[in-house]
Every structure is written in structure tokens, then in C-alpha cells.
């Protein structure tokens, strides 16, 4: 399952099917955000939604989101050769370029493990919440 999911993630990061608008800065009007800032980076970022933590791909800086991974779109394989997964998972706790959203207090035991199963990435990630 994980190998298939990571392969799908690589494929999507190299050629994203769905891209979320970002860039410009935190708290700007949605009409000022762009799908692609032209810098060649692709970001995997998360944010809380009514259904839980949602993971999205960006081709512009994901201000105000939880930036998990970033790679040059032309060389996604390099990211997966060098990624430190402990750092990537720690990034889920940090809001990038915006105010820090409340998180589970340090030392509090996780309540459950959630496996993301998406039609794009497959069942590739488990998060403790």
C-alpha cells in the first residue's frame, strides 16, 4: 500500500492534476492568489477542514497552510531520495507564513490514527491525531 501511494504522490507532484491557489502572502483575498507562481516548486501542504486534515498540492507558496514537503517539479525524485520523514511529519504541526493554529498540547496522548485514502494518492499516509 505505501509503495503504491508514494509512487502516486511522486506522479502527482511531477504533474499535478489538481492545484490549489496560494502565493502572495497570508490572509490575502482569494482573487489575488495564483495557481502557479512560475518558480518551478511543487508543495504538499495540509490544512484543517470540517472533515479533518486535508492534504493539497500547490505550485505557489502555501502561506497559512502546513507545508509538509516541497520539491522542484522537474526533479521530484530527488526529494524522495533525500527526504527526512521525521521533519516532514513535524511540519504538520507548523503553520507556514501565518499565525500558528492551536495544536494538540505536547505530551497529550493521540486519540486515534487516521489513514488517508484518496483517489489521487491512494492509502499512503497515516497521521496520529
Image: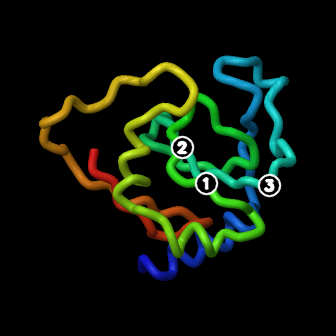
Category of crowding for the residue at label 3, using alpha-carbon neighbours closer than 10 angstroms: few (below 14), some (14–19), many (at least 20): few
| Vertical arrangement, residue 50 with respect to residue 2, above or below | above
Q: Residues within 10 Å of mark 2 (few under 14, many from 20)?
A: many
Q: Quadrant of residue 93?
A: top left
Element type where label 2 sits in the image: strand
The disc, 3 or 2, on the residue closer to the chain's N-terminal end is 3
Of 42 and 112, which appears nearest the observer?
A: 42
Query: Residue placed at 61% from the left, 49% from the top?
Result: 56
Callout in the foreground (3, 2)? 3
Q: Position of residue 52 (x, y in %)?
A: 42, 41
Contact flag, marks 3 and 1 (Cβ < 8 Å)? no
**Residue 79 vertical placement versus 88 (above, below):** below
Q: Is residue 97 above or below residue 119?
A: above
Q: Which mark is residue 83?
A: none
Residue that mark 2 sits on: 67
- The disc placed on residue 40 is 3
* Residue 84 sits above or below residue 53 on the image: below
Q: Are marks 1 and 2 in contact (CB under 8 Å)?
A: yes
For residue 114, side relative to residue 98 (left or right): left
Residue 103 in the image: x percent, y percent?
Answer: 32, 30
Question: What residue is disc 1 on?
Answer: 70
As drawn, is 62 to the left or to the right of 86?
right
Amino acid at each position: 500500500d505505501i509503495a503504491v501511494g508514494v509512487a502516486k504522490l511522486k506522479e502527482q507532484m511531477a504533474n499535478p492534476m489538481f492545484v490549489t491557489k496560494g502565493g502572495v502572502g497570508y490572509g490575502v483575498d482569494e482573487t489575488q492568489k495564483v495557481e502557479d507562481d512560475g518558480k518551478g516548486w511543487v508543495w504538499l501542504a495540509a490544512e484543517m477542514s470540517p472533515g479533518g486534515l486535508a492534504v493539497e498540492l500547490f505550485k505557489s507558496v502555501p502561506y497559512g497552510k502546513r507545508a509538509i514537503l516541497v520539491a522542484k517539479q522537474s526533479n521530484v525524485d530527488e526529494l524522495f531520495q533525500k527526504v527526512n520523514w521525521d521533519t516532514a511529519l513535524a511540519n504538520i504541526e507548523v503553520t507556514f507564513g501565518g499565525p500558528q493554529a492551536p495544536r494538540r498540547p505536547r505530551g497529550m496522548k493521540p486519540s486515534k490514527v487516521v489513514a488517508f485514502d484518496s483517489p489521487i494518492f491512494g492509502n499512503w499516509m497515516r497521521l496520529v491525531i
